Amino acid sequence: MPDPAAPRRRSWWGDPRLRALLFQALFVVALVALAAIVVDNTLENLQRRGISTGFDFLAREAGFGIIQTLVEYSETSTFGRTFVVGLLNTLLVSALGIVLATLLGFLIGVARLSPNWMIARLAGVYIEVFRNIPLLLQVFFWYFAVLRALPGPRESLSLGEAVFLNLRGLYLPRPAPEEGFGLVLTALAVGLLATVVLLAWARRRRIRTGRPLRVGRYAPLLAVALPGAAWVLTGAPLAWDLPRLQGFNFQGGLTLIPELIALWLALAIYTAAFVAEIVRAGILSVPGGQTEAATALGLSRGQTLRLVVIPQALRVIVPPLTSQYLNLLKNSSLATAIGYPDLVAVFAGTTLNQTGQAVEVIAMTMAVYLTISLGISLLMNWYNARVTLPGH
Amino acid sequence: MGTEKHSDALPPPASGLGVVGWLRRNLFSSIGNTLLTLVALYLIASTVPSFLRWAIIDADWLGTNRADCTSGGACWVFVTTRINQFIYGFYPLAEQWRVNAAGLLLVALVAPLLIRALPYKGVLGLALLAGYPFAGYLLLYGGAFGLPVVATHLWGGLMLTLVIALVGIVLALPLGVLLALGRRSQMPVIRAACVAYIELWRAVPLITVLFMASVMLPLFFPADMSVDKLARAMIGIVLFQAAYMAEVVRGGLQAIPKGQYEAAEALGLGYWQSMGLVILPQALRLVIPGIVNTFIALFKDTTLVLIIGLFDLLGIVQQAFADPAWLGYSLEGYLFAGFIFWAFCFAMSRYSQALERELRRGR
């Protein structure tokens, strides 16, 4: 009598594990073959067009100018330098955009939930208008229809003879630190550090003994008082370099080029509409019972917000918010459409055209975005693992 | 013995009823709220009437050149004289009926799909996915049945925007489904490849993908093979969009209870059978709103093709500003293009929201 537990005899392809192995092996072979064909074609094409390969071009002289550089750069700098300049410009507009989009988005998200009917409606109109119009169109609108329509330097719009706005950009006073300003900064750092340490100690003591430390409430004053004292003692060591009209243009001060302003505004206004929806969903996700329970426990209004509502809302808000920040970073590459010198415009645009080394340049550009995105994703996974409630 | 008599309830105070009550509750419930209302009213009063006067009351609508714009308001003549170009691009006038026919055919196929009560969804869907691409290609490009070829560099305007978006979604969906299945596969090599593909494409901006499609893709093909510029852009967009679509579909796959997988296996269904007959029909139904949202994003993203020299709606409007006879009408052009994009996206997002509510009710 045959053993009923013995497996039935099957042909070898009936074994799912073997079949999976075979399938994966075939997949790898196909992938490698495809890669080989592409590499072969590419090398042949490059040779035919007389384009060199490798990363030697990074050390060659670039020979073109860039309208906004955060680090030292001239036409005699290398192509490698154009990469750094472009990357920094990308990071600058992304950081500015993220700050403004967050402020605007939180404001509008809260306004959307306002008990005031009109405010809630206005916020709703803002969201529906700006998130349904392509970002590129908004960039063009701010750049070509608004900033290009501004008057020339002599008829600048001005604010208190310190801030000027005209066709060529926004001119702001530039802070010019004098001797002793370093001391103020040091005092500020020490004050902040002391505050943090003091608050952490007060918190530990409260948890251990159950009694709050009254002094702890005044700890943040340290961060104001120390640098304030240093400021007075060193005699207000900060001057302002004001922009002044000389001839046909402004000299001195801090200049924001119109390309930066247009891109910044468009990115922030567009992304804020998405941030507002995320904030609204986050706040709505905290059930009203939580607030009532906190009140029943005797927590004050501020404590309820700080200890109960915000932590739970943030758990819902932070992951999609991060992905909006990443979107903003990626969208900053629209700079190339209006000539703001970001990574894509400078490096994947001008440098690529001058060297013809498309493969290397595009790979380096993509690698930058990939590194930032994957880095933030890892951070997000860590954050999610930390804040996920057990059992969810 | 109860001898007490209830007196009739008093009516609520007049100030809490009707229009006055609504106003008090929603606009003037506190000092802060009243201030906010006044600020909002001031904002509206200072912008909306002057905008309406500029855009409608004082505007010029009819005419043939800029001399017809005399009233000082918006000059819509700029748009009306070019409306044909904005819609059809440089498509030859005599052949434009083909674009209209393709559009009507699409509407005829899609409209019954969107209305839930109508039957024959499977047949229509199949006709849309399997038959329409060929019919559409034949109508728009031509080259058979006596239709002359219209080269793709003549395509433009709203028509090109719609073509890119539709091709993008129709091809990205099956690729995205495969990628999503691969990402949840038991086979480590397949899973790793799919994860790498999805994360790579989602991490980079679409512009770099389009740059890659326009400068690098020709290098990948054999030297004697030349690929149409529009086709290259579409390849880039489809590969890019498939990664986003895969994540949407994966959400649906994860929402299907494990019991469904086990039940399909217990019935003796193989992998493709259980996916095709049991899991995917349920999962895809769940993610229709997500697919519509992806489509909205794709629709907005098609504007980026102007950077590699294709004239979609925004590209062709932008190009019209360079006409020396019509300098200085960019505001009108952007408002027109913006309104068209907005109308499409707003309608789609409303549809997606309604669908989401309906799906939630059904469960």
Image: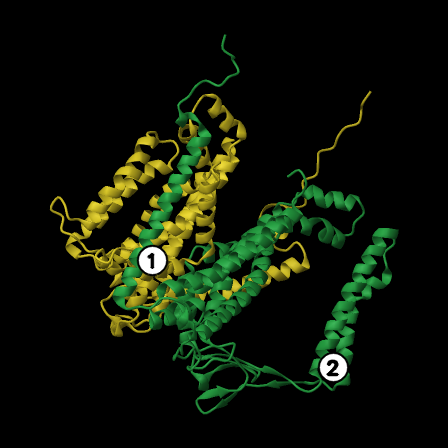
Q: Which residue is mark 1?
A: B213
Q: Amino acid at mark 1?
A: Ala
Residue A122 seen in the current view: no
State the residue at coordinates (29%, 56%).
A41
What residue lies at 85% left-to-right and 56% top-to-bottom? A205
Instruction: Give the percent coordinates (x, y) of residue A44.
Output: 28, 60
Residue B46 % position (x, y): 50, 67
* Chain B palette colour: yellow
Identify by letter the chain in green: A
Foreground residue among A71 and A234 = A71
Mark 1 or 2: in front is 1
Taking depth in this image into account, of A216 and B340 the one nearest to the observer is A216
Q: Is residue A8 left or right of residue B150?
A: right
Instruction: Tell me the residue that label 2 is attached to.
Output: A231
Seen from the viewer's position, the closer of residues A8 and B348 is A8
Q: Quadrant location of residue B104?
A: top left
Which chain's residue wears label 2? A
